[in-house]
């Protein structure tokens, strides 16, 4: 598979220079499933072998209990897997937590924190930054400059001409998350690494493997963000539990609800890797209940890291690999179908 730019990778849902499918040695499997979920393991293992993947992971939790935790090849319980776009869900949550802690609202404008931004950029709301409706360009070169800070890159992004007026349409991209992260930094007085540690990683008991890399200019929408399957499962369980973990409020119920609401509304779709699917804050809305809240949400990463929450059935699935999501997505779908069959 040819190497492609990060922007094209996101739009085509493929990870650049992803491994092809040469002959590989027999892969070793570890982990376990509860007896009733044996068919889930059988489906997962058979599909992993058929694709010739060199590593994979799977976590299934239902009603607060781990039903399956499985690993294959080079991915183990402690392996920090590249999240790619699955990072958006975590980043949005950290930003929302920082907003709450500092008395801000989703309706606050960028101009409050970046008064020197271009006039139209100053009117962008935090809500729009986290829902791909800000009108900002999808990506900017400064996002990949490790020598900058998040604030410096945000200032560069906000000096550019908007692709569309704020709130005029849905255009999937990453630059808005850099700006949102810089807003959170300025509001909290903390650099991103400390903000993430204090608001997310620490309260959830994530391992040191959960990281945005060593730069002060992390790409919050994808980039070098890594986490283990187990750590990401802790994050999803917190959301399933209404923003609470071990009695600690990570995110208010109001923010969890905002995350689940349709933030792209009936806006025209300008750029989207998932067609007409609606978007909340940091994640896709695959299904909706009569109250307007998403019942199923996901945030697939182009390298094949696919997290999913089913709020109605109190179910979460974390599927991890590092290949091409176009090859892996059918495996994920087959696994979820097997889980739902057991859950009936």
Image (tube, rainbow, N blue to C red):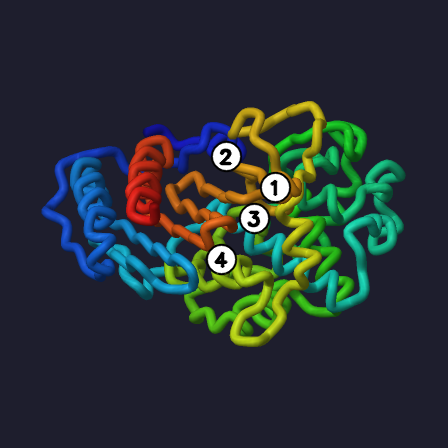
Task: Give the image location of residue 324, x and y in percent.
Answer: 35, 36
The residue lying at 52 percent from left, 29 percent from top is 273
Q: Kindly identify which numbered label has been placed on residue 174.
A: 1
Query: Which of marks 3 and 2 precedes in the sequence?
Result: 2
Locate the N terminus by quadrant.
top left
* SS of the residue under disc 2: helix
Say which residue label 4 marks: 236
* SS of the residue under disc 1: loop
Task: Give the image location of residue 82, x and y in percent.
Answer: 41, 51
**Label 3 near label 2: C-beta < 8 Å?**
no
Q: CA distance from mark 4 to mark 3?
A: 13 Å
Q: CA distance from mark 2 to mark 3?
A: 12 Å
**Residue 1 or 84: which is nearer the viewer?**
84
**Label 1 near label 2: C-beta < 8 Å?**
yes
Task: Give the image location of residue 313, x and y in percent.
Answer: 45, 50
Query: Which of marks 1 and 2 precedes in the sequence?
Result: 2
* SS of the residue under disc 4: helix
Query: Which of marks 1 and 4 precedes in the sequence?
Result: 1
**Residue 308 or 77: which is nearer the viewer?**
308
* SS of the residue under disc 3: helix
């Amino acid at each position: 598979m040819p190497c492609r730019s990060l922007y094209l990778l996101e739009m085509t849902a493929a990870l650049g220079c992803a491994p092809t499918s040469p002959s590989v040695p027999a892969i070793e499997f570890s982990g376990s499933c509860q007896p009733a979920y044996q068919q889930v393991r059988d489906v997962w293992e058979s599909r992993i072998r058929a694709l010739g993947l060199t590593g994979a992971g799977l976590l299934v939790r239902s009603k607060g209990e781990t039903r399956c935790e499985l690993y294959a090849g080079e991915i183990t319980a402690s392996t920090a897997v590249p999240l790619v776009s699955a990072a958006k869900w975590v980043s949005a949550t950290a930003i929302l937590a920082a907003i709450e802690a500092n008395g801000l609202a989703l309706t606050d404008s960028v101009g409050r924190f970046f008064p020197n931004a271009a006039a139209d950029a100053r009117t962008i709301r935090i809500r729009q930054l986290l829902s791909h409706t800000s009108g900002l360009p999808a990506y900017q070169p400064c996002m990949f400059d490790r020598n900058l800070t998040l604030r410096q890159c945000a200032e560069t992004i906000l000096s550019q001409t908007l692709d569309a007026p704020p709130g005029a349409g849905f255009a999937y991209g990453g630059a808005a998350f850099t700006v949102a992260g810089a807003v959170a930094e300025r509001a909290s007085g903390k650099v991103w690494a400390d903000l993430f540690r204090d608001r997310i990683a620490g309260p959830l008991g994530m391992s040191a493997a959960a990281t945005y890399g060593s730069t002060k200019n992390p790409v919050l929408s994808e980039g070098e963000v890594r986490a283990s399957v187990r750590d990401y499962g802790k994050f999803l369980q917190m959301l399933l539990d209404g923003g609470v973990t071990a009695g600690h409020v990570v995110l208010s119920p109001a923010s969890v609800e905002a995350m689940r609401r349709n933030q792209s509304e009936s806006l025209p779709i300008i750029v989207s890797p998932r067609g007409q699917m609606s978007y909340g804050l940091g994640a896709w809305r695959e299904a909706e209940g009569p109250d307007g809240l998403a019942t199923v949400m996901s945030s697939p990463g182009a390298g094949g890291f696919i997290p999913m929450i089913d709020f109605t059935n109190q179910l979460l699935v974390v599927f991890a690999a590092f290949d091409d999501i176009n090859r892996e997505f059918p495996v994920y779908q087959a696994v979820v179908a097997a889980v739902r069959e057991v859950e009936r």
